[in-house]
């Protein structure tokens, strides 16, 4: 859109304003950091910390790279060993140089959960003053996810001894589990083959109505990973115990496709298994080609006559002449026999269930297929994407947090870069000396820019072209 006779677009003006805001932000952040370093220098214990000059470092922020100086100090340990420290770095909880701000890391992690690392890097670079590569985005996700994994490990360990941190008290808990196959690359492909099943588990207390005919799972807990079954179940229990009081749960309704690793979650009589209706009906359509046979099987299922259903399938397998059809019926018979206890939905078993919490309903299970796609499949499957087991596990951790609406809070809690509260107020203040440098100069490197139109309709643009 051209807004002047000399073809200065609104887009160009907007970009210039953005660059100027980033520039001012970098200058003010530099002043705050160096002011804090000066304050630490004046209040330090001079008998312990000997000032040895200043060193430059860089912090990557959403406004771009901020280069500043901070003092280095010489100190002696109890053993008389000489070492050097940066009091500013210690007060902010960081170490090294060239580090990244928590806000920038948060934006990169959020973008990486929505699209590929390359696209995420491009989007963050376009919206901030910092240029990052797709490898930087990848490294941020790995770094954040490894800290999340440490929390998962601690939660699983606490849950194993009955010391989970969960506070939600519920007598009934729904659980659903399923897997999704992802393509592997590099060493992971050599070790596990071309693909591997990523396990996914969700737990929730019921469903809340959010609109006309629309429901969402309440207090949903999500865990996913490539781990072996035993470790996966331990981590899943840790995630549940971090939200719910596990000792108060009297009934668990476990839904799944009947895979062996899912059925291993049936640990005692409090766990009631239900074969996922989607996979149950899919098996009938897949292995039985005759519509009349299919209809009869559905009738027996709805009548809850499971013994007759199995007898009927066995009789069909002995009577059909086509070898392929017979093989399909035998597979269906084996599948239903192994999952006989889960063929009838929980709401048709006459079970006595506790009252649901206020605003929560006990609806039929079967939300796993949708969750598999929205949580994992939409981001990690397709587009010729291939993964290492470590990289897939790490991204899946963030995707699970995102599905639980806990990603922003988790990312902020992991950022250890802190400053005293008083510096928050200094961000909104320009000193008199700075005002003269920012306002009224009329030149900032864009001398060839045409002035805005002088007509009344464009009066709001006056002054913007000089920013």
Image (tube, grey):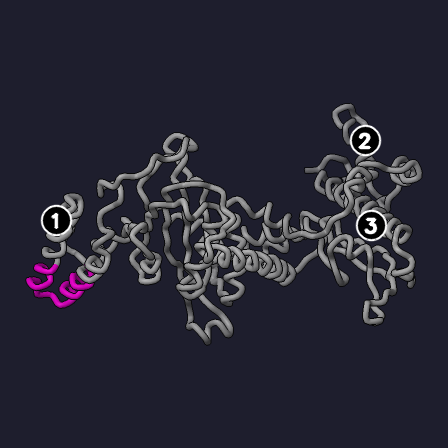
**Mark before the other along the chain sequence, 1 or 2:** 1
- Badge 2 marks a residue whose secondary structure is loop
Using the image, tell me which numbered label, if any, was put on residue 13: none
Using the image, tell me which numbered label, if any, was put on residue 33: 3
- Looking at the rendered image, the disc whose residue lies closer to the viewer, 1 or 3, is 3
The spot of residue 180 in percent (x, y) is: 40, 59
Q: CA distance from mark 1 to mark 2?
A: 78 Å
The spot of residue 329 in percent (x, y) is: 16, 61
* Residue 254 horizontal side relative to residue 40, left or right: left
Residue extending farthest to the top is 456
Range of magenta residues: 314-332
Q: Residue at x 17, y 66 (%)?
A: 327
Give the labeled residue for mark 1: 296
Q: Quadrant of the C terminus?
A: top right
- Looking at the rendered image, the disc whose residue lies closer to the viewer, 1 or 2, is 1
Q: Quadrant of residue 17?
A: top right
Asked if the residue under mark 2 is in contact with the one under mark 1, i.e. CB atoms within 8 Å, the reply is: no
Give the labeled residue for mark 2: 462
**Closest to the observer: 382 or 360?**
360
**Closest to the observer: 378 or 414?**
414
Q: Quadrant of residue 316?
A: bottom left
* Residue 260 horizontal side relative to residue 91, left or right: left
């Amino acid at each position: 859109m051209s807004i002047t006779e000399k073809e200065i677009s609104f887009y160009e003006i907007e970009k210039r304003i953005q660059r100027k805001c980033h520039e001012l932000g970098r200058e003010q952040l530099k002043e705050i950091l160096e002011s804090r370093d000066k304050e630490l220098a004046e209040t330090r214990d001079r008998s312990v910390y000997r000032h040895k000059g200043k060193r430059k470092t860089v912090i990557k922020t959403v406004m771009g790279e901020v280069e500043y100086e901070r003092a280095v100090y010489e100190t002696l340990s109890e053993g008389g060993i000489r070492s050097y420290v940066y009091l500013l770095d210690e007060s902010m909880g960081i170490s090294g140089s060239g580090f990244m701000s928590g806000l920038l890391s948060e934006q990169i992690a959020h973008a990486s959960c929505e699209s590929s690392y390359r696209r995420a890097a491009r989007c963050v670079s376009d919206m901030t003053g910092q240029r990052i590569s797709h490898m930087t985005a990848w490294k941020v996700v790995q770094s954040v996810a490894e800290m999340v994994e440490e929390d998962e490990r601690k939660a699983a360990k606490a849950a194993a001894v009955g010391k989970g941190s969960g506070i939600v008290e519920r007598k009934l808990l729904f659980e659903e589990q399923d897997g999704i196959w992802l393509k592997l690359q590099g060493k992971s492909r050599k070790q596990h083959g071309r693909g591997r099943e990523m396990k996914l588990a969700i737990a929730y207390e019921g469903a809340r109505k959010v609109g006309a005919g629309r429901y969402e799972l309440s207090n949903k807990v999500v865990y996913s990973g490539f781990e072996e079954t035993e470790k996966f179940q331990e981590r899943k229990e840790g995630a549940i115990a971090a939200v719910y009081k596990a000792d108060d749960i009297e009934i668990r309704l476990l839904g799944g496709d009947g895979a062996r690793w899912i059925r291993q979650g049936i640990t005692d009589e409090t766990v009631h298994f239900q074969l996922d209706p989607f996979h149950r009906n899919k098996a009938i359509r897949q292995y039985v080609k005759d519509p009349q046979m299919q209809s009869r099987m559905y009738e027996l299922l709805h009548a809850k006559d499971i013994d007759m259903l199995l007898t009927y399938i066995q009789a069909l397998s002995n009577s059909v002449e086509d070898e392929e059809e017979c093989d399909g019926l035998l597979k269906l018979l084996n599948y239903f026999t192994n999952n006989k206890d889960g063929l009838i939905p929980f709401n048709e078993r006459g079970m006595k269930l506790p009252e649901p919490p206020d605003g929560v309903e006990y609806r039929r299970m079967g939300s796993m297929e949708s969750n598999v796609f929205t949580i994992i499949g939409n981001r990690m499957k397709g587009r010729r994407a291939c993964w290492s087991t470590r990289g897939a596990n790490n991204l899946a951790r963030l995707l699970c947090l995102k599905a639980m609406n806990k990603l922003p809070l988790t990312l902020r809690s992991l950022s250890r870069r802190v400053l005293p509260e008083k510096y928050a107020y200094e961000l909104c203040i320009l000193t008199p000396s700075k005002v003269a440098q920012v306002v009224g100069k009329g030149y900032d490197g864009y001398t060839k820019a045409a002035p805005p139109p002088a007509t009344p309709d464009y009066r709001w643009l006056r002054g913007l072209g000089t920013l």
